[in-house]
Image (tube, grey):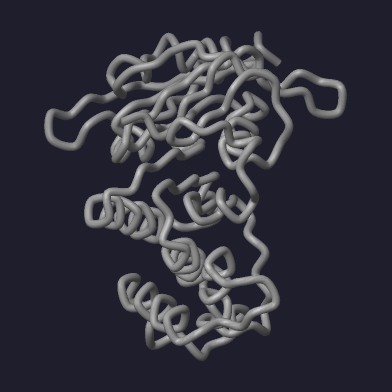
């Protein structure tokens, strides 16, 4: 079953076309990773899937055009984990996670017992129940990201959109966050669309990669097809070595350019 289908989607922001006739399909239960240089259009594509930006063309969720769905209907199906989520420092973790139940609560209604149970269930699954009464401002970066994921999980979504979920985390916290997403995907049958800069991490977790540059697809496939030294050099302007391991997958390692080459490019 196709969960997400984009057909010739174009998006113009501030008079600039940032996505140009882009098409994409994601099957149920799959993890697709969008990669590309800064300004390539990755985040804008993800926002279009969530119905957060106007677009030309077609964006369908489970066969329904997203522009025809109410914000509440979209929020019941999709959880968005943004790069820089709003984290009210004085709010407790449990109250923050409870915000994820908003799409399931009637207008002008208060959270019920079922919403509280769902929130604590999300805290338990992400192993942060002990932090429930702590203020968000007292958490480490990795702990905050767990809280953000718990809020997303409390929504009971079927699709999760990740926009640079590990950008401000150390390597240990990065692995923990992505392992949690992978676990939730396997246990709940979630579909995942991620926009990430870290090529090695994306290669290790996503089933399929789409390389985007200037709002267009330039390569698609598994990590060994997309993450080649030639493509990375062409679209990122980076010198790398791509190391393929049968068990661990693909790793993209930056290498220093010779001094002469570096001087010529300055």
Question: Residue 191's quadrant in the figure?
Answer: top left
Residue placed most toward the observer, 17 or 144: 17
What residue sits 27% from the left and 49% below the top?
A: 189
What residue sits 53% from the left and 88% below the top?
A: 134
Q: Is residue 54 left or right of residue 226?
A: right
What residue sits 47% from the left and 51% below the top?
A: 77
Residue 88 in view (yes/no): yes
Residue 237 in view (yes/no): no
Residue farthest toward the bottom in the current orientation of the protein: 133
Residue placed most toward the observer, 97 or 112: 112
Question: Residue 131's quadrant in the figure?
Answer: bottom left
> At which x and y percent is residue 30?
31, 36
> At which x and y percent is residue 41?
63, 27
State the quadrant of the N terminus: top left
Q: Is residue 185 left or right of residue 211?
A: left
> At which x and y percent is residue 31?
34, 37
Residue placed most toward the observer, 42 or 118: 118
What residue sits 45% from the left and 87% below the top?
A: 113
In this picture, is 83 found above or below 257?
A: below
Residue farthest toward the right in the current orientation of the protein: 15
């Amino acid at each position: 079953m196709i969960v997400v289908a984009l057909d010739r989607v174009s998006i113009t922001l501030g008079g600039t076309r940032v996505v140009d006739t882009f098409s994409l399909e994601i099957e149920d239960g799959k993890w697709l990773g969008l990669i590309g240089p800064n300004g390539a259009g990755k985040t804008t594509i993800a926002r279009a899937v969530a119905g957060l930006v106007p677009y030309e063309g077609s964006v369908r969720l489970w066969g329904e055009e997203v522009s025809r769905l109410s914000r509440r209907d979209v929020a019941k199906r999709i959880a968005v984990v943004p790069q820089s989520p709003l984290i009210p420092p004085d709010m407790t973790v449990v109250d923050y996670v409870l915000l994820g139940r908003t799409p399931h609560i009637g207008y002008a209604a208060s959270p019920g017992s079922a919403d509280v149970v769902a929130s604590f269930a999300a805290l338990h699954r992400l192993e942060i129940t002990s932090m429930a009464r702590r203020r968000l401002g007292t958490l480490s970066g990795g702990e905050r990201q767990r809280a953000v994921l718990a809020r997303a999980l409390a929504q009971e979504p079927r699709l999760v959109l990740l926009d640079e979920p590990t950008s401000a985390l150390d390597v240990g916290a990065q692995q923990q966050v992505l392992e949690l997403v992978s676990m939730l995907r396997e246990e709940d049958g979630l579909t995942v669309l991620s926009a990430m800069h870290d090529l090695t991490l994306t290669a290790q977790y996503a089933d399929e990669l789409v390389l985007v540059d200037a709002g267009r697809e330039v390569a698609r496939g598994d990590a060994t097809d997309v993450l080649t030294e030639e493509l990375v050099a062409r679209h990122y302007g980076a010198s790398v070595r791509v190391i393929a391991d049968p068990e661990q997958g693909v790793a993209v390692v930056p290498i220093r350019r010779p001094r002469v080459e570096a001087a010529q490019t300055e």
